[in-house]
Amino acid sequence: MNLTATQLTKLTIDAYTDLKFEKPAGIQWRALLNPTELSFSRKNNYEATQSAGTSAPQQSFSGGEPDQVQLDLLLDGTGVVGEPGPVGDTLDALLALTKFQGDTHQPYYVHAYWGRFSFRGILTQADVTYKLFDRSGEPLRATVKLSLKEALSPEEVTAQDRPASPDLYQTWLVRDGETLEGIAAQVYGAPAYWRPLAAANRLANPRGLVTGQLLMLPPLAVA
């Protein structure tokens, strides 16, 4: 059976008032026409550090940035799809998701989904271009470039990072004045873990850390 244009799965955006996406705002926006283009961006940051006795700098992971998505949408009220008429109200409903809310003191969090695509975050930007107007000046066609940035709760960040995972190794860039005991206390929650940390890095002198030195942090189960 062939699906008609009105039966096809449509891009949908649900609004929430909390970062855990547990409190729906009761607002849902659904596209009449699905995105003409969808782009995804993920970025990791690295710091170049020159350790003593090395000929080239080492690249140390310093953190990631939130994933970002851009959706290119077409709003068409010419009657090609659906009932003909101005698209102003549909556009206003979409832009309302970016507006400041007095009760939460920020715009809504949003969950955008369409087929395999599912993205939770915030709407950071909406660029609108009007393409066609009726005789009264009401817009009949408009394109929208919608930018979204990922938003994760602290619990989700912790779950993704899995700092205590038994199969995960990390690195640590030594800063001025840091000691092995202090690093062990920050990473493992107890300064006594300095011994396995020293062993993992083959440190003959645990008190001889050098600023800019890159340490290997063994998993908690190993340490």
Image (cartoon, grey):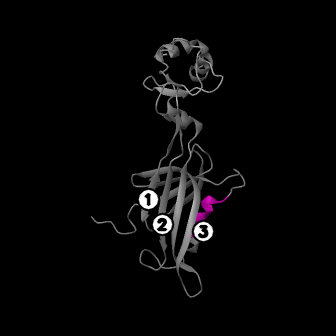
The CA distance from mark 2 to mark 3 is 14 Å
Q: Which residue corresponds to mark 3?
A: 92
Picture coordinates of residue 25, whole percent (x, y): 61, 53
Task: Report the side of 59 relative to 123 (left or right).
Answer: left
Nearest to the eye among marks 1 and 3: give it: 1
The CA distance from mark 1 to mark 3 is 21 Å
Picture coordinates of residue 204, whole percent (x, y): 51, 11
Screen quadrant of the N terminus: bottom left
Which amino acid lies under the numbered mark 3 shown in the image of this protein? Answer: Asp
Which amino acid lies under the numbered mark 1 shown in the image of this protein? Answer: Leu
Q: Which residue corresponds to mark 2?
A: 73
Q: Is residue 68 visible?
A: yes
Picture coordinates of residue 188, whole percent (x, y): 56, 20
Q: How busy is the neighbourhood of tag 2: few (under 14 within 10 Å), some, or many (20 plus)?
A: many
Nearest to the eye among marks 2 and 3: give it: 2
Q: Which residues are magenta?
A: 90-99
Which amino acid lies under the numbered mark 2 shown in the image of this protein? Answer: Leu
Determine the secondary structure under disc 1.
strand
Q: Which residue corresponds to mark 1?
A: 38
